[in-house]
Image (cartoon, rainbow, N blue to C red):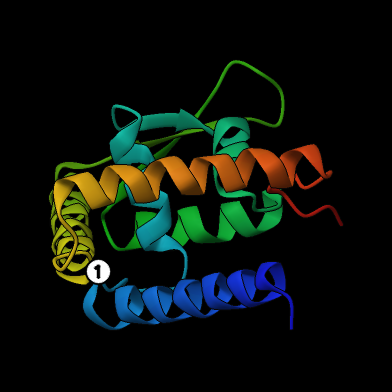
């Protein structure tokens, strides 16, 4: 096995394990997709159009509408008509904003716990190296979104 192959294998393993650790110790969602929806809204001043949400979450319009309706039934968002045709606006309620704050805090704690063994300098080096890897992968034609 070449050094390059071994390194990428280690990175895949590290990614899989950190994802599992975040899932196990990070924020929990009440229903599938609702947590991601309120988090994106929270990071965007509590309001986005359906078109912006489709782009941000990489969901199709039908799935987004289903998730938004679940979140609305739970009292986390409101859905309002927008000016553009076939578009609506999703807004966080106070309850949804509180839940988003709680989720973001849980995610920060889980991330801090996972990376606790790294010094600040090591984290900076890791960030620089992973950014370099990302740029290299993009140069090879990978762009982060799946089509289809």
Whether residue 99 is visible to the viewer of this picture, yes or no, is: yes
108 lies above or below 83: below
Report helix, strand or loop for mark 1: loop
Q: In this orientation, which residue lies closer to the viewer: 103 or 128?
A: 128
Query: What residue is drawn where x is 63% and y is 69%?
Result: 8
Query: What residue is drawn where x is 29% and y is 63%?
Result: 74
- In which quadrant is the C terminus drawn? bottom right
Residue at which label 1 appears: 27
Report whether 123 appears left or right of 37. left
Q: Residues within 10 Å of mark 1 (few under 14, many from 20)?
A: many
Report whether 66 appears left or right of 46. right
Q: In this orientation, which residue lies closer to the viewer: 54 or 94?
A: 54
Query: What residue is drawn where x is 23% and y is 62%?
Result: 111
92 lies above or below 18: above
Q: Residue furthest front?
A: 2
Q: In this orientation, which residue lies closer to the viewer: 5 or 26?
A: 5
The image quadrant that residue 143 belongs to is top right
Where residue 65 sits in the image (x, y, percent)? 58, 52
């Amino acid at each position: 096995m070449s050094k390059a192959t071994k390194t990428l294998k280690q990175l895949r393993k590290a990614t899989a394990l950190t994802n599992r650790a975040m899932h196990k110790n990070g924020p929990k969602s009440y229903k599938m997709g609702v947590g991601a929806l309120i988090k994106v809204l929270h990071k965007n001043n509590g309001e986005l159009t359906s078109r912006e949400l489709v782009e941000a979450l990489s969901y199709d319009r039908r799935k987004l509408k289903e998730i938004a309706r679940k979140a609305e039934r739970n009292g986390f968002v409101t859905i309002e008509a927008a000016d553009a045709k076939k578009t609506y606006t999703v807004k966080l309620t106070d309850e949804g904003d509180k839940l988003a704050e709680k989720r973001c805090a849980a995610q920060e704690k889980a991330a801090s716990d996972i990376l606790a063994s790294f010094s600040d300098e090591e984290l900076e080096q890791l960030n620089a190296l992973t950014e370099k890897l990302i740029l290299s992968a993009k140069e090879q034609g990978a762009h982060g979104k799946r089509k289809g």
